[in-house]
């Protein structure tokens, strides 16, 4: 997610390849890659983890370059769905870890404020995912900030 609560530029990231064709150094066939991705997804890996494994261990720069379709779309076509979108799940996990920290450090006001900002991001994202139909309309994230103090 972009920088929402500070007035700085976003994080730097690697550049995408100029040509979206399969590189000549990738020797795996499309069937082997699809079997590997499905196996990793069934192990419980998230799409970003699968992409990093493909990049680091198998020399596949981007999944879309080789297969012609995005990784999340490919997983949906093969019947592998996640209950939450990955960015929302990561934010919820981050908030959960921060709540655990605040149980033992009740006077940590800086992290209490950080939790408020994280939960604001969760609410923004959930509203977006409800609007586009990736989350059910009755899905709700229960805030924790009121109970921390």
Image: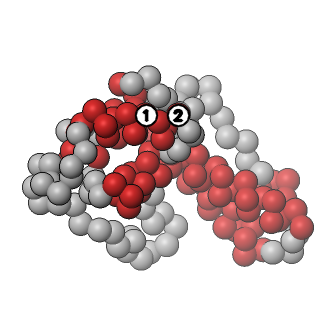
Residue designated by label 2: 42
Mark 1: give few (<14), some (14-19) or many (20+) Cα within 10 Å: some
Left or right relative to 39: residue 21: left
Residue at 12% x, 54% y: name it. 24
Who is closer to the viewer here, 129 or 55? 55
Q: Secondary structure at mark 2?
A: helix
Q: Percent position (x, y) of residue 4?
A: 48, 63
Q: Quadrant of the C terminus?
A: bottom right
Q: Percent position (x, y) of residue 122?
A: 58, 49
Q: Which label is found at residue 38?
A: 1
Q: Secondary structure at mark 1?
A: helix
User: Are the residues flagged by discs 1 and 2 in contact, CB closer than 8 Å?
Assistant: yes
Residue at 21% x, 52% y: name it. 26
Furthest residue in direction front, as rendered = 27
- How many angstroms separate mark 1 from mark 2 (CA)? 6 Å
Vertical arrangement, residue 109 with respect to residue 27, above or below: below
Displayed quadrant of residue 113: bottom right
């Amino acid at each position: 997610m972009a920088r929402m609560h500070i007035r700085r530029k976003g994080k730097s990231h690697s550049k995408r390849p100029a040509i979206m064709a399969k590189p000549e150094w990738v020797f795996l066939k499309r069937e082997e890659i699809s079997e590997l991705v499905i196996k990793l997804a069934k192990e419980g890996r998230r799409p970003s983890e699968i992409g990093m494994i493909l990049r680091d261990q198998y020399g596949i720069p981007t999944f879309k370059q080789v297969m012609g379709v995005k990784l999340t779309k490919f997983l949906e076509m093969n019947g592998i769905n996640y209950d939450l979108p990955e960015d929302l799940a990561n934010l919820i996990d981050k908030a959960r870890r921060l709540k655990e920290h605040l149980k033992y450090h009740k006077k940590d006001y800086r992290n209490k404020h950080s939790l408020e900002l994280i939960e604001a991001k969760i609410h923004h994202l959930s509203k977006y995912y409800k609007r586009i139909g990736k989350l059910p309309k009755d899905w709700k994230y229960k805030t924790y900030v009121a109970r921390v103090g």
